[in-house]
Image: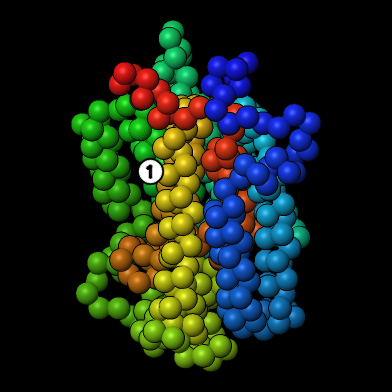
Amino acid sequence: MTEMVYGTVRSQPGEAVLPRWWRTVDKVVLFAILCLFSIGLLLGLAASPPLATRNNLPPFHYVERQAIFGGMALVVMIVLSMCDVRQVRRMGVLLFLGTFIALMFLPIFGTDFGKGATRWYSLGFASLQPSEFLKPAFIVTCAWLLAASQEIQGPPGKLLSFGIAVITALFLVFQPDFGQACLILFGWSVMYFIAGAPMTLVMAIAGLVGAGGVFAYSASEHFARRIDGFLSPEIDPRTQLGYATNAIREGGFFGVGVGEGQVKWVLPDAHTDFIIAVAAEEYGVFLVLVIIALYAVVTLRSLWRLMRERDPFARLAGTGLALLFAAQAIINMGVAVRMLPAKGMTLPLVSYGGSSLIATGIALGFLLAFTRTRPQGQIADILIKRGR
């Protein structure tokens, strides 16, 4: 029925799933994603051996784990990208329910691994961070509610999505994980604005977030310490930010040479939160610019394809996922160059981390599914007809 009403791109009868997927998927975005993952493995080879040595593990222990988790993430991404919009919506809602329940029980069964924030479940052989999986599922669920609210006699989706966003952000703040809470609220605000929210309401929400930040500063010593360190005019060279800043400065345009960097020997999070410092020191600003360009390709090309999408749900969810992906990359790199306070956030597809890699694979699988060429018309068709 959809093809009869909206059909401008016809599917080929009897076409197998894989050829149809290859014909309709955005190959440019797919190539950029594979490049980012490959760069992550390259930087893992540079950044993780010192940590493995300190933990009495084989030199390439973390690289091998990153390759395994990354391979799983790519498989999940490709499988999800083959799904249609309705299947993605169902999986996203179910995943949100599961991860939200896991988030609720973190204070009871979770662990902090000595980092001062209870964000993980220890599985013995690995750890699981529910907030990473929550993000793409949250975007899909809220997009579904916002799109449903635009239908005649539809549910109060805007109000429901706002309630879900606030409750989810509060659970993240209690960990505490202010960075993920900000990402959740950012993703919801973007979709809410696109769905037709007035600018005054968006500004009011931004004001509430600012007020929440002031409260967090006064109530959380962990949060206040990070803000004070960011606002301080002097950088302590013995802190992670100090080491990262010096490494970026030493790298210059082409870097000090492969394997010659020193920051990986002193930074405990060189393979995760500060992986961009390793890239800048050993490979220079040139590689950093390549990484930024790849993130821009994934984000901007996805947004360009979504601009022509007629399905409100796919347009909202795809936009939220694309901008969430870009925002996390900007935050990670912004922290490394001291443009933002430290937030403990990984660089998508590049940093080490099983939960982060697989969750990113889920998010990008959803995004590729939303941006595929499907047998439907584009939003430009409606605008042309209305102009006649």
Is residue 135 visible in this depiction of the protein? yes
Position of residue 285 measured from the top left corner of the image (x, y, whole percent):
40, 78
Q: Nearer the viewer, residue 228 or 165?
A: 165
| Quarter of the image that includes the C terminus | top left
Local packing at callout 1 (Cα closer than 10 Å; few below 14, some 14-19, many 20+) is some
| Residue 33 seen | no
The secondary structure type at the circle numbered 1 is helix
Q: Quadrant of residue 127?
A: bottom right
Along the viewing direction, whichever of 349 and 107 lies nearer the viewer: 349
**Vertical side of 120 occupied by 371: above or below:** above
How far across and down, in percent of the image, does residue 94 sit? 64, 31
In the rendered image, which quarter is residue 63 located in? bottom right
Is residue 141 placed above or below 73 in the rendered structure?
A: above
Amino acid type of the residue that numbered disc 1 sits on in the rendered structure? Phe
- Is 194 placed left or right of 31 in the picture? left
Residue visible at 75% across and 43% down in the picture:
18
